[in-house]
Image: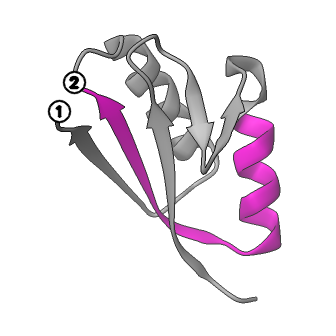
Amino acid sequence: REVKDVVVVLVSRSGQFALGQDYVPDDQLWSRLNELHQERPIRTLIIKGDRDCPYQKVVMAMDVAQALNIEEISLAVEQE
């Protein structure tokens, strides 16, 4: 299977998730990442949060990545 090296999950200031340009409701984050992971395994998930985003949303994205057995999880803060 082809490996998709990096996927970025954005967390907005208001706590919304996005994959690329598409907003993803909280209850669909696991299924959307799982679809991508099944198509081409994700080696690294970067969780890029607005500096004022709700911390529990970052934790939620980390929990989803761990549930999908994604090898590497990186955290990034979006600068102003």
Q: Residue at x 22, y 38 (%)?
A: 77
The x and y percentages for residue 23 are 67, 32
Residue at image mark 1: 80
The x and y percentages for residue 60 are 50, 23
Q: Residue at x 73, y 75 (%)?
A: 40
**Identity of the residue furthest to the left in this view:** 79
Helix, strand or loop under label 2: loop
Magenta residue span: 30-50
Q: Is residue 21 magenta?
A: no
Helix, strand or loop under label 1: loop
Q: Is residue 3 above or below residue 62?
A: below
Residue at image mark 2: 51
Q: Is residue 24 left or right of residue 59?
A: right
Marks 2,1: beta carbons within 8 A:
yes
Q: Which mark lies nearer to you, 2 or 1? A: 1
Q: Is residue 13 left or right of residue 64?
A: left
